[in-house]
Amino acid sequence: MSSSASSVLETQIFQYIDVHQSDLIKDLKEWVAVESDSVQPDFRKEVIRMMTLTADRLAALGATVNSVNLGSHQLPDGQDLPLPPVILGELGKDPQNPTVCFYGHVDVQPAKKEDGWKTDPYTLTEINGNLYGRGATDNKGPVLAWINAVETFRALKLVVNFKFVIEGMEEAGSLGLEKLLEEENQCFFSDVDYIVISDNLWLSNKKPALTYGSRGNACFSVEVECGDKDLHSGTFGGIIHEPMTDLIALLDSLVDPTGRIQIPGIYDSVTALTEEERKLYESIEFDLEEHKNNSGVKKFLYGTKEEILLHLWRYPSLSIHGIEGAFHEPGIKTVIPAKVIGKFSIRQVPHMDLLVVKRQVVEHLEGVFSKRNSPNKLKVSMPLGAKPWLADINDPLFKAARRAIKTVFGEDPDFIRDGSTVPVARMFQTITQKSVMMFPIGAADDGEHSQNEKISRHNYIEGTKVFAAFFLEISKLHRHLHKTSNMETNN
Ligand SMILES: Cn1cncc1C[C@H](N)C(=O)O
Ligand code: BAL
Ligand SMILES: [Zn+2]
Ligand SMILES: [Zn+2]
C-alpha cells in the first residue's frame, strides 16, 4: 500500500471510530457488568460466562475461536474449582501480512460498593469524561479497544493477520497458561511475528508510554496454627502463645520502615545499577506530585524522581496484603483465632531467582519463629511465582508503536518499565522467543485494583485509534524489513 493510500485509510478509520464512540462505550458497559472476579471462588461462573461473551465477540469479528479447556485447580481447602478456558483466536492468514498476537485478560480484581466506590463497580458510569467501573482499565477496556480497532479494519482492509490469547485467570496468577503456551508453541504460535500486551498504565496522566520491562512477583502464605478451634480471650488470654501474635512478629520482620527488605541475601542477585542506566532515569519525565496525588498518600519513601522510579522498576519490593482468619469486621469480638494466614508478596527483578527467593524467605521466617519458642505450627509456602520481563526497545514493534502514538497523540511516548506483573510477558518471551511489547492505553491515575477504577473516554477512544494506527505501521515496517532481508539473501 502506498503511503498516501495508507493515510487515507487511517483518516477513514479514525472517523469511523469517532462516529461509533457510543457503540464502543456500550460494549465496555456490557463487559463491565459481568462480575468476572477470578480471585473469589464464588464468582467463577461469572468468569466462565465472561469467556463465552469474549469468544462470541471474537467470532462476530469473523475470527476462528478455540476455547481451550484447562480442567480444574484445587483450592487450599481441597475444593476443586473449574478453570475458565483460554481463548485462542485467529483472523486472517495472508502470508504477505505480519501476524500480531494480542494478549489480554477479562477477569478482574474483587470489588464491592462498600469498599468505598462512589458508583456501583459493575455499572460503567461516565462522570466528567471518565468511565468508572471494575475492569474499565484492567483489562476489559484495552481488550475491547484492540478488538474494536481490528473490527474497523475488517470493514476496510486487513493489513495484519491477527491472533488473540484471552484469559480469565490473570488476577489469580494465570493458572494453566504456561503449559498451554508450551503445548501450542509449535502450532498456534509458530507463525506469530509479534506479541502485544496492553495491560498496564502510562507513567503520566496525560503523556503516552511504551513499556519494555515489568517486575515479577513471588507470592507467599505464612500460616500459624495453635489448635483446631478459636478460643475465648478471657478464658485463655494470658496463658497461651497466640497465633496472631506470632504472625504479626513474623510479618513485622520482613521489611523495615525505610522500605528495605530484611530477608538476608534478598538483594544479592539484583543487577547492579550502571552509570548509563542512572542517566536514563534522569531523562525520564515524571511528575512526582502528580503521582502522589494519584495515590492519595502524603509522602513517599523517597524524595527524588530517580529514586522513586528505581524502586518501582528495578529494585524488589515487599508488600503485605492481608491476614486470612483474622477478625476484620467492624465491632468487637474478643476471640483468639486458632489459625491465621498472612499473605505477602515480593515484586522481584532481574536477576533474582524464584527458587532462591523462596528458600531465603522460608529460612528467614523459620529463624524468626524459632527465636519465639512458640509451640504453634508454622507453614510457609509460595503458591505463586511470576518472573520479571525485559524487552529490547530496538525491536520493530516499538518503532511501529512509537509512530502510531505520534500520529494519534501528537507526541513521542515515554519509554518506561512497570512495577507490576503480567505473568504471561516473560512466559511468551521464554517459550515462543518472539518479541513482546507492552502497549498501554490507560493513564497513571486509572486506579487499577483500587476503588473507583476508571478509563477516560479520551484514552479509550484514542486508544482504539492508536491500535488501528499501529496495525498500519507494523504492516509497513514488516514489509519493508522483509523486502530488505529478501534483497540481502538474493544478493
Ligand atoms: C496475580 N498476581 C500475583 N502477582 C502478580 C499478579 C498479577 C497482577 N497483574 C499484578 O501485577 O498484581
Ligand atoms: N496491570 C498489571 C497487571 C495486572 O494487575 O493485571
Ligand atoms: Zn491486568
Ligand atoms: Zn490487575
Image (cartoon, rainbow, N blue to C red):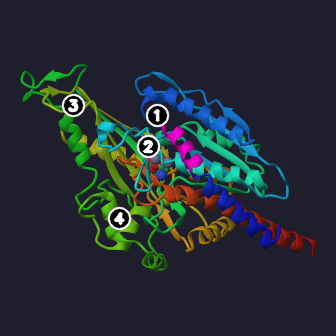
Amino acid type of the residue tagged 3 in the rendering: Phe
Confirm or deny contact between disc 2 and disc 1 (CB under 8 A): yes
Q: What residue did someone put label 3 on?
A: 327
**Residue corresponding to mark 2:** 134
N-term-proximal mark, 4 vs 2: 2
Residue placed most toward the observer, 44 or 304 = 44
Say which element carries label 2. loop
From the image, tell me which residue sits under label 1.
35
* 248 or 288, nearer to the observer: 288
On residue 291, which mark appears? 4
Determine whether the residue tagged by mark 3 lies in a helix, strand or loop.
loop
* Mark 2 or mark 1, earlier in chain: 1
| Spatial separation of the CA atoms under disc 3 and disc 2 | 26 Å
Give the residues drawn in magenta, as a range: 22-33
Does the beta carbon of the residue at mark 4 sit less than 8 Å from ligand 2?
no
Q: For marks 2 and 1, give the CA distance.
A: 8 Å
Element under label 4?
helix
